[in-house]
Image: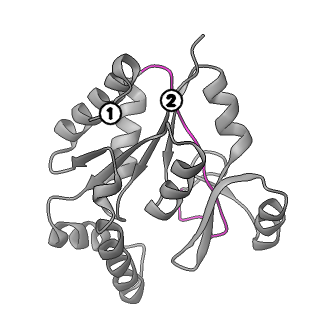
Amino acid sequence: MARGTLIIISGPSGAGKGTLVDRVVARVPRVWVSVSATTRQPRPGEVYGEDYLFLSPEDFQQRVDEGDFLEWAEVHGNRYGTLRSSVEARLAEGYDVILEIDPQGALQVKEIMPDAVLVFIVAPSFEELERRIRRRGAETDEQVKTRLATAVRELALVDTYDHVVENDDVARATDELACIIESIRTDGGRP
């Protein structure tokens, strides 16, 4: 069986990354989404091992010290990371592996695994991005401002990605992302 491809999906908070990834995974066979570890507290309804691996700051640091992470970063005051062993195992089994991570982590992984394909998800406008973040109702006004400031920095990195998908319509954007993954399987997915 051929080794799978690592697909890194990034974009600012509110772009709709999670929604698109969920829809693509339900539609495209042999795709596995890596579950990131984090030090942040679970939001209502989030489940350990499905949404994130919720770790204490001490456990996270121990794993950093032991080199267990493919990448990790501090974002909005919390740490997030991707465990190397689970990604490598799935790739070896022939699965295409999706990492839904921030651009800082994406660029770290790209250095280690240059064959990774990077896909950036954007909202149709900055105003729409802010509306989506506020609609979630999960953050304070100060946290929203922090996310928007981070989005400005992340959007400046869009040109470093192999593909950009505008999430203006969920069905259309899902089709586009699925087509990118299928093209990876047939021709390496490079633009």
Residue 126: x and y in percent read 18, 70
**Is 71 covered by the magenta stretch?**
no
65 versus 67 height, above or below: below
Q: What stretch is highlighted in magenta?
A: 29-45
151 versus 174 height, above or below: below
Determine which of the numbered discs, if any, sits on residue 41 in the image: none
Residue to which mark 1 is pinned: 190
Residue at the (49%, 54%) spot, across then down:
106
Which of these two is toward me, 65 or 18? 65
- Circle 2 residues within 10 Å: few <14, some 14–19, many ≥20: many
Q: Quadrant of the C terminus?
A: top left
Residue 29: x and y in percent read 45, 19
Residue 59: x and y in percent read 82, 65
* Left or right of 95 in this view: 135: left
Residue lying at the far top in this picture: please name it: 1
Residue at the (55%, 57%) spot, across then down:
108
Residue at the (49%, 57%) spot, across then down:
107
Rounded to the nearest angstrom, the CA distance separating label 2 from label 1 is 12 Å
Q: Indicate the amino acid at tag 2.
A: Thr
Residue to which mark 2 is pinned: 5
Which of these two is toward me, 41 or 75? 75
